[in-house]
Image (spheres, grey):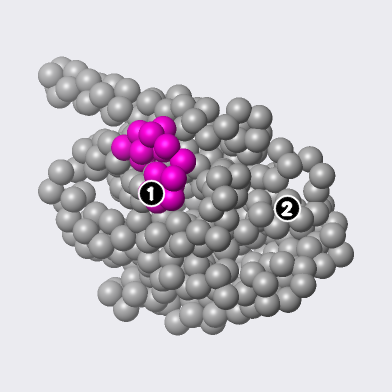
C-alpha cells in the first residue's frame, strides 16, 4: 500500500511539473506571438477548458480500462501538448500553441485522478494520509519545473521552444512509472474480461443534492478558480512591474506552497475533520489576497503566491476527503468526473477573465475578483454544519 502511494506521489510530481511549466511560461510565450496582449492568458484558459471537458471521459476510461490504463492514455496527451506548443512557438501560430496547451489540459485532467487512486489504494485509516501524500508529490514539481524553465527559456530561438522540447521527457517518465503501481482489484465486473455491465448506483442528480457533495464541489471549484486566476495573472503583472526575471522563482515557491502542506494535512484531517481543514485553507487563501492588495513588490507577489498556494492545498484536500464520503465504489466515476468538470470550467473562466482584468484594470482588481469567488466557502461550510445539527437533533 505504501509502495503504491509512493509511486503515485512520484507520478504527481511528474504531472505537476508540466502544469508548473505551462503556468510559468504560457502567458509570457503568448506575448511573443499575439498583438492583443489582453489575450495572453487565453492558452492558459484553454488548458483548463480542456481539463474540464476531459474530466468525465477520463474518469469513464479509467472505469473501463483501470487506473493504470487510463493514466497511460493521459500521458499521450502530454506528449502531444509538447509537440504542438513547440510548433506553435516556432512558426508563430497562436492557435497551434493553444492546441498544445489544450492537450496539456487533457493530460492534467487524467492526472487529477491520482488523488482518488491513492484513496482507493489505502485502508480507511490510512486514506487521509494517502490523499495528502500523493497531492504532496507536487513538491517535486516546485523545483524541477522552476529549474527547467529557468535553464531553458533562452536555450533556443524563439524563447521557450527548448522548454517544451525538454518537457516531453515528463509524460514519458510518467507512463513508465505508473505501470509499477498495483491498484486493488475493483469489486465490479471487468468489462474487458467479458463480464456483465457494471452498475451505476444512484442517479447523479440525487448524489449532487447531498450537502457533503455540494460543499466538496464548492471547495474544489473555488480553490481551483481563485488559485488559477492568480497564477495566470501573476507572471503578466510581474512583467509589467519589471520583475519578469523573478517569475520562475515566485512560481517555484508557489508550487512548493501548493504541495508542502500535504506532508501534514493527513494529520490535520484526522484531528480536526474535513470542514475545519477547508476553513483553514480559506483563511490562508484570504491572507494571500490581503498581501496582494498591499503592493506590487517582489515581496508582495511572493507572499500572495505562498499563502494562496497553501490555502489551495488545504481546501482541495479537505474537499477531496469529503467527496469520497458521498459515493459508493460503483458511483465514483460519475461523481468524481462531475466534481472535477465543474471545478475546471470555473478555473478556465477565471483564467481568461484574469488576463483581461489585469491588462485593463490592474492587479488589485484581480485580487478583489478572487475575494468574490472564495467568500462562498465559509458560507457553505456553516450551512452544512447547520444541516448536520438539525439532522442530529431530529434523529
Residue 122: image x %, image y %? 29, 65
Dot 2 alpha-carbon crowd within 10 angstroms: few under 14, some 14 to 19, many 20 or more = many
Residues drawn in magenta: 287-302
Please indicate whether residue 376 sits to the left or right of residue 233 in the image. Answer: left
Which element carries disc 2, helix, strand or loop? helix
Whether residue 155 is in magenta: the answer is: no
Residue found 24% across the figure and 54% down from its top: 265
Please indicate whether residue 7 sits to the left or right of residue 199 in the image. Answer: left
- Indicate whether 177 appears above or below 299: below
Location of the C terminus by quadrant is top left
Residue found 68% across the figure and 77% down from its top: 155
Residue 62: image x %, image y %? 54, 61
Residue 147: image x %, image y %? 50, 73
Q: Do the residues under discs 2 and 1 have CB atoms within 8 angstroms? A: no
State which tag comes first along the sequence, 2 or 1: 2
- Indicate whether 43 appears above or below 129: above
**Which numbered disc, 2 or 1, marks the residue closer to the eye?**
1
Location of the N terminus by quadrant is bottom left
| Visible residue check, residue 322 | no
Q: Which residue is mark 1?
A: 299
Whether residue 296 is in magenta: the answer is: yes
Amino acid at each position: 500500500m505504501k509502495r503504491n502511494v509512493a509511486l503515485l506521489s512520484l507520478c504527481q510530481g511528474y504531472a505537476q511539473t508540466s502544469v508548473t511549466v505551462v503556468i510559468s511560461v504560457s502567458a509570457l510565450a503568448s506575448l511573443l506571438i499575439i498583438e492583443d496582449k489582453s489575450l495572453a492568458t487565453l492558452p492558459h484558459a484553454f488548458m483548463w477548458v480542456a481539463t474540464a471537458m476531459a474530466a468525465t471521459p477520463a474518469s469513464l476510461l479509467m472505469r473501463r480500462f483501470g487506473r493504470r490504463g487510463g493514466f497511460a492514455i493521459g500521458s499521450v496527451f502530454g506528449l502531444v501538448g509538447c509537440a504542438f506548443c513547440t510548433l506553435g512557438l516556432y512558426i508563430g501560430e497562436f492557435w497551434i500553441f493553444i492546441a498544445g496547451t489544450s492537450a496539456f489540459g487533457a493530460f492534467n485532467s487524467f492526472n487529477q485522478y491520482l488523488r482518488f487512486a491513492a484513496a482507493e489504494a489505502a485502508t480507511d485509516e490510512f486514506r487521509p494520509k494517502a490523499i495528502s501524500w500523493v497531492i504532496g508529490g507536487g513538491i517535486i514539481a516546485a523545483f524541477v519545473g522552476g529549474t527547467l524553465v529557468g535553464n531553458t527559456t533562452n536555450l533556443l530561438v524563439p524563447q521557450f521552444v527548448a522548454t517544451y522540447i525538454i518537457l516531453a521527457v515528463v509524460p514519458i517518465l510518467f507512463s513508465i512509472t505508473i505501470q509499477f503501481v498495483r491498484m486493488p482489484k475493483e469489486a465490479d465486473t471487468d468489462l474487458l474480461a467479458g463480464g456483465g455491465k457494471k452498475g451505476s448506483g444512484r442517479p447523479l442528480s440525487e448524489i449532487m443534492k447531498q450537502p457533503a457533495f455540494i460543499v466538496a464541489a464548492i471547495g474544489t471549484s473555488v480553490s481551483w478558480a481563485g488559485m488559477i486566476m492568480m497564477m495566470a495573472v501573476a507572471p503578466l503583472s510581474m512583467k509589467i512591474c519589471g520583475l519578469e526575471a523573478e517569475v520562475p522563482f515566485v512560481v517555484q515557491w508557489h508550487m512548493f506552497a501548493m504541495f508542502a502542506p500535504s506532508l501534514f494535512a493527513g494529520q490535520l484531517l484526522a484531528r480536526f475533520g474535513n470542514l475545519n481543514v477547508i476553513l483553514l485553507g480559506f483563511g490562508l487563501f484570504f491572507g494571500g489576497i490581503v498581501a496582494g492588495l498591499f503592493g506590487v513588490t517582489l515581496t508582495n507577489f511572493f507572499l500572495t503566491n505562498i499563502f494562496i498556494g497553501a490555502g489551495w492545498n488545504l481546501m482541495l484536500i479537505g474537499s477531496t476527503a469529503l467527496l469520497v464520503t458521498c459515493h459508493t465504489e460503483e458511483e465514483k466515476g460519475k461523481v468524481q468526473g462531475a466534481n472535477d468538470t465543474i471545478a475546471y470550467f470555473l478555473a478556465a473562466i477565471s483564467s481568461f477573465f484574469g488576463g483581461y482584468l489585469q491588462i485593463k484594470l490592474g492587479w488589485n482588481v484581480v485580487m478583489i475578483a478572487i475575494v468574490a469567488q472564495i467568500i462562498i466557502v465559509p458560507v457553505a461550510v456553516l450551512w452544512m454544519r447547520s444541516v448536520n445539527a438539525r439532522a442530529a437533533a431530529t434523529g
